[in-house]
Image: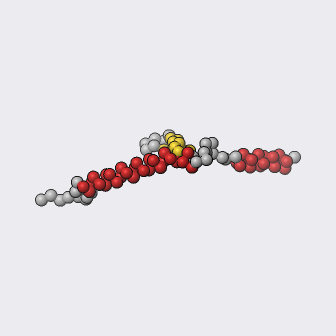
Amino acid sequence: MKKTLLLLLISAFLVSCGNTKPDQVAENSDDKLICTTTKKFGSNMNTKTCRTVAEQKEERKRNQEAMRNSNKNSTSSGNTGGATIGN
């Protein structure tokens, strides 16, 4: 009897573990929803953020462009980021 009950519990556990399919997956990879959990600085609460692959690509592109622009601005103004010594 105990073996049968144990076998049933293990079977139920394995069946439930096998059904870990993501909730929202589209055929197009850019429409795939990816969720991340992050902890904000100074807080113990987690924040869950869900974005599509396309949104992540767009944000990455904007961030890279902003870095390029900030690098162009700092080099065009003569600021090399180092300390200057005045006479």
Q: How is the image coloured?
A: secondary structure
The residue located at (45%, 43%) in the rendering is 40
In this rendering, is residue 81 above or below 39? below
Relative side of 6 to 52, left or right: right
Q: Is residue 80 left or right of residue 18?
A: left
Depth check: give the residue in front, 20 or 75. 75
Whole-percent x and y of residue 82? 25, 59
* Residue at horizontal 22 percent and vertical 57 percent from the top: 78
Q: Could one spot residue 80 in this view of the protein?
A: yes
Q: Residue at image x 76%, y 45%? A: 12
What is the x, y in percent for residue 14? 74, 49
**Location of the C terminus (image quadrant):** bottom left
Q: Would residue 73 be found to the left or right of residue 28 on screen? A: left
Q: Residue at x 55, y 45 (%)?
A: 31
* Residue 81 x %, y %: 27, 57
x and y percent of residue 46 in the render? 51, 42
Relative to the observer, which residue lies in front, 75 or 6? 75
Residue 46, visible in the rendered structure: no
Which residue reaches farthest left?
87
Q: Please count the marks in the image.
A: 0
- Which is more toward the observer, 59 or 83? 59
Specify the farthest residue to the front: 28
Task: Specify whether 11 is left or right of 43.
Answer: right
